[in-house]
Amino acid sequence: MFETTFKNIDDILHKDAGCSSELDYTEQTSWMLFLKYLDDLEQDKKINAELMFEEYQYIIDEEYRWSSWAAPKVDGEFDYDNALIGDDLMEFVDNKLFRYLKGFKQRAESPDTIEYKIGEIFSEIKNKIQSGYALRDCLEKVDELRFRSQEEKHELSHLYETKIKNMGNAGRNGGEYYTPRPLIRAMIDVVQPKIGETIYDGAAGSAGFLCEAFDYLSKKEGLSTQDLDTLQNDTFYAKEKKSLAYVIAIMNMILHGIEAPNVIHTNTLAEKIVDIQESDRHDIILANPPFGGKERTEIQKNFPITSSETAYLFMQHFIKTLKVNGRAAVVIKDTFLSNDDAALVRKELLESCNLHSVLECPAKVFTAGVKTVVLFFTKGEPTKDIWFYQLDPGRSLGKRNPLNDNDLIDFVSLHKTFQQTNKSWIVDSTKLNNKYDLTPKNPTIKETPKLREPIEIIEDMMSREEESKDGLNKIRGLF
């Protein structure tokens, strides 16, 4: 039933003039889902308070509760006579509801509260639906969803993950929100987080890493009430720069069972690396920072090794943010292993951390076709031997044939003993050249001239074009 409901909502939004893409569908569904979830949560808490003969203090004032304006009911049946519709509904949502919810950011006691999250979300998102009749139809469909049982939440989280995946396949900037879940699960299997350790993602996107880590830890047998409380409040931490991704991250974590996610809406790289204190550090880092992005000069000055490439700045942030003996698994574009402009960052990584493993992924693991690697490292001692694994599913990957969990079983198994095979080998870090070049070179495969991927050729051409324009502008400036 839930799957049909999600599809019906997308069909309604597709016909509305204000929504033009999968990104818009997910964004608009997110704020409605959030308010429906909040109403169900408050109803549950009210019932629990009554069982304890206590009075429950609502977070949301009655006029703005979902059950008052979105889905009013009489004797359990939808009250069509008093339900807002058309222009009246749009007037209420745009000029009253969103303004009221946005105000929670100022009224909240601290950023760790659900009240602050409400204010933050509605400070960053707006209603894009233009028809009050389309909005009414969507609200009635969302009201069919239930968040009461763990089974319902699990099904909803699965469907929401599918929406995020569709965003990744939609082109434009959608791919930055989605890292293939089988890859994330393999990374977690290698890092093996434990209850009581903190887990951090400074480029959260849709919070896929934290959601999968929560699933991994919450399924462990024999968890105590204290363990469950630790998972809820003191385990997962994230930062996200972009508004839409922030909202989706919050909703995704809530659907996976984390009631008040510790996600901060901020540009992680705006923080000076020298200001990071021990209290800011974490036991585990799981991340896929954006690559190919550019940061302003003043942001680059926050780092000892300046670079306009965001991924190289994030690598410095992660190294600094990791606790001694902390473990990290980070996805990064494969050019990090060899590019000259990343040599100093590689040096820092190899000298301050034990880069014990590198997983080389094929190009089509990500829908954009960019080749990536996963770096696994532990902080506190320099790198000695590096175990490389060349992932080869034995088939062509793509949207219709994506990476799956079975593709990574061999990697996870061999990693336990750093076994050498025809797809895995060990490199002695002391034999690296002075640029710390880590280009994967499988010794069991006879080298053939490497043909560049079309996307690499296009990126190179665009880069050269930009350089040419800069050169011409400088020449013009002389005359």
Image: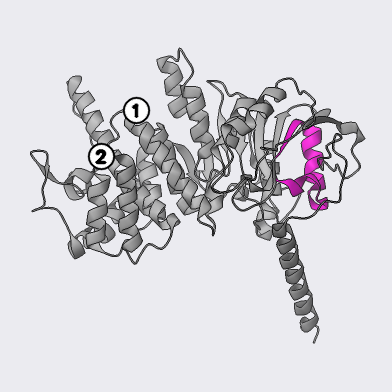
| Residue tagged 1 | 150
Q: Element under label 2?
A: helix
Main SS category, magenta section: helix
**Residue type (three-letter) at the residue carrying disc 2:** Asp
Q: Is residue 354 left or right of residue 326?
A: right
Q: Residue at x 85, y 38 (%)?
A: 445
Tell me where residue 223 sits by quadrant: top left
- Residue 342 is inside the magenta segment: yes
Mark whose residue sits in front, 2 or 1? 1
Residue 112 visible here: no
Q: Of the residues shown, which amino acid type is indicated by label 1? A: Gln
Residue 44 sits in quarter: top left
- 441 shown above or below 257: below
Residue 314, percent across and down? Answer: 66, 45
Q: Is residue 25 visible?
A: yes
Q: Nearer the viewer, residue 369 or 25?
A: 369
For the C terminus, the quadrant is: bottom right
In this figure, which residue is indicated by the disc labeled 2? Answer: 39
Image quadrant of residue 432? top right
Depth order, front residue of 111/156: 156
Whole-percent x, y for residue 245 in the image: 48, 49
Q: Residue furthest front?
A: 395
Instruction: From the viewer's perspective, tell me whether residue 439 is left or right of residue 433.
Output: left
Range of magenta residues: 333-360
The correct choice, above or below, for 358 with respect to 166 in the image is above
Query: In percent of the image, x 49 and y 18: which residue is there?
Result: 220
| Residue sitting at x 88%, y 40% | 446
Say if 410 sits above or below 116 in the image.
above
